[in-house]
Image (cartoon, rainbow, N blue to C red):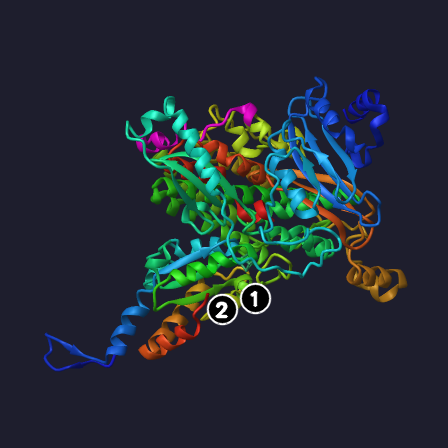
Amino acid sequence: MTAKSLELLQQRFGAELVEVDDYLGDASVTVRKSAVHEVLAFCKDEPTLRCDLLLDIAGVDHPEREERFEVVYLLRSLQTGTRLRLKTTVADGDAVSTVSDLWRSANWAEREVYDLYGVRFEGHPDPRRILCHHEFEGHALRKDYPIGKGQMCYVPEALLTDQQVEGSHALDVESRSGQLQNVDGEIASDLLAINLGPSHPAMHGALRVEALLDGETIVDARSEIGYLHRCFEKEAEDHTWQQIIPYTDRLNYVSALTNNVAYVHAVEKMLQLEVPERARVIRVIVSEMGRIMDHLVCVGTNLVDIGALTNFWYFFNAREYMYEVVERLCGERLTTSYTRIGGLYRDLYEGFESDLRFALTKVAEGVKDVTGLVQRNRIFMDRAIGVGAMSAEDAIDWGWTGPCLRSTGVDYDVRKAFPYLGYETYDFDIPVGENGDCYDRILCRIEEIHQSMRIIDQALKRLPDGPIQSPDRRVALPPKDEVYNSIEGMMNHFKLVFEGIQVPAGEAYGFIEGANGELGFYIVSDGSGNPYRMKVRPPCFPIFSSFTELVKGQMVADAIATLGGLNIIAGELDR
Amino acid sequence: MGVALEHPSNYITTKLRQAVNWGRKYSLWPMPYGTACCAIEFMGTVGAFTDISRFGAEAVRFSPRQSDLLLVAGTISYKQAPILKRIYAQMAEPKWVVAMGVCASSGGFYDNYGTVQGIDTLIPTDLYVAGCPPTPENLLSALVQLQERVDREGLEVLKERHRDSQIA
Ligand code: SF4
């Protein structure tokens, strides 16, 4: 597939392509800046490529080059399975033409590149900062921006300006002849701007939405993120490869185990490193545990938002049992840091299997109770069916992945589409919904808990004996007698401890199915002990970008119900 | 409470300060300013296993006007700084602030351009809870410590303390 798509692009755009590459099986094309839009449009529409999903856009800074910034587009096709990376270079102060007219997911992704690198996108509908605050000066991910230089923010940003309120009001008056009329009966009321978050109980972390209401109906909305921007990507450039693992816990802190697996998976891809079978099976087990815990929290809190508090206790009790296992395994409940490059932090403890099986029976009980309470519950169905619905095409256009995408009826799951860790050998189903509404999202997640339990069961049964760490000397410390008795062993030990793991120069995109969708790491290495650039592709970033569209025309209460079902985790949203 | 029972069933006598503090310490209403991972552990603390209501602090209020314990659980970024300050200012006296987790206490291992290096650079803080995240037990122990402190505080002292810390 890779070779074919590269060939096709070469035939069509020969002169515009600067470089073509398929290092580690990632097809990568560098094109001239002027042709970016054309080539991307081609990739999207050409029937043999059909890159319908724009996963992410990343910036890379090379201050020594004349055209110092690289803009990297990660493309994917759900129909043909094409994976493509498109790059272009741009000088400081120059602009690239926007692709937000091709994919709606490009909107926020481009804003992020602008915010962190200062690359402008011509024709972008909303060229504002996104992660850093509005009083921030400079661009944080440029290599010459010092990591420790904080800038205080004094005034929170107003999202809806007075003009926008006025504008929407005019719009509203106009449309009163249309469907909006029966919202408030005959009485035309003033529009009311309300602010939700970033400290709001239903906002699930530090998110902020400002909505313009006509009665209870949302006429217009703006959202703002970045309140939990903890500079993961800058920190990654400042740490050794192994030291980054604790930071990955805190991306999606609800399923930290899955994040740990995702990160080392990407780094091992760059090292072309095989991990022992036992470690692979354990990684499957812990990723599925992460998924289960994530879904428990998501569904539990989503139901609380709708007013069904009991379910929260049922799920959190089940989760507590899971946490006990996790704590015994890793020493921490939430921030696990369980994987290591080339293997795992430590082996399973004795009695792990029976503990886990016991915890899973508790999860199954909790799920049964909750399903019994809500699935055919009239109140719940009225609150959830048809609320926050998204069509499959729109969802893909917005860059959705994971359970949210599957609830719209698309059966895309990385575990099946691009199997890793041997997922192709496990027997499990991909639950899909039909309407992509709040109800389907909750039921999809509940069903995924069952499927994850099936996978864990199979993994526990097949768990082989053996080492849990690859013996490869690039990543593993040599045995002690070698360190004491041979100069090579000692040097090896010294280098690994003092300089850390050296990842060969190059770039790659490693991805897995996170609890909330495709979780990927786009990594650029210059061969030193630190990553040169590390871009996370968090599943909820594109999902949340569609939120305001999703809630327009809905009631406030429905917006809250919708938000909970999307499972936005601020840690990975803002990084 | 220094209680003297003179007429066994009708009334008790005590000092005003003690009576007030006794009431305050067992009815701390927390407002969780939860931003990150620590907030998830706060949810765990509220949950049935560790059950914060045993300590009288289960009346979680999301309005600063209704609460007297600001529980900052999670990383505070510069983007949030003005909001945190405003929420603190909106709380009525008497009020206490607990920094839950190393991020809120000192920035934790996020020593970078986006993260406030401890909420005490923004608002007066009474108690720091170690851990990343603190376990629910750890948070409960902090709560008990805070209760002890509330019990010791004089009414006047309290007023003084917060007059000093008026923030813009
Ligand atoms: S202290 Fe640790 S667990 Fe708490 S918010 Fe900070 S990183 Fe997360």
State whether residue A311 is above or below residue A405: below
From the top left corner, tell me how far across and down residue B78 is, in percent: 56, 57
Q: Please give the count of numbered marks on the rendered protein.
A: 2
User: Would residue A378 be counted in the magenta stretch?
Assistant: yes
Mark with earlier residue (1, 2): 1
Residue A194, can we see it?
yes
Q: Quadrant of ligand 1?
A: bottom right
**How far is disc 1 from disc 2 in space, using C-alphas?**
9 Å
Q: Give the side of residue A193 with respect to residue A430, left or right.
A: left
Q: Residues within 10 Å of mark 2 (few under 14, many from 20)?
A: many
Instruction: Give the camera-side residue of A220 and A258.
Output: A220
Find out if the beta carbon at label 1 lies less than 8 Å from the nearest ligand 1 atom.
no
- Amino acid at the residue labelled 1: Ser
From the top left corner, tell me how far across and down residue A496 is, in percent: 79, 59
From the top left corner, tell me how far across and down residue A297 is, in percent: 46, 45
Q: Which mark is residue B128?
A: 2
Residue found 42% across the figure and 49% down from its top: A200
Asked where in the image residue A130 lies, by quadrant, the reply is top right
Q: Residues within 10 Å of mark 1 (few under 14, many from 20)?
A: many
Q: Are marks 1 and 2 in contact (CB under 8 Å)?
A: yes
- Amino acid at the residue labelled 2: Tyr
> From which residue to which does the magenta span run?
A375-394
Provide the secondary structure element on which disc 2 rests.
strand
Which residue is identified by label 1?
B106
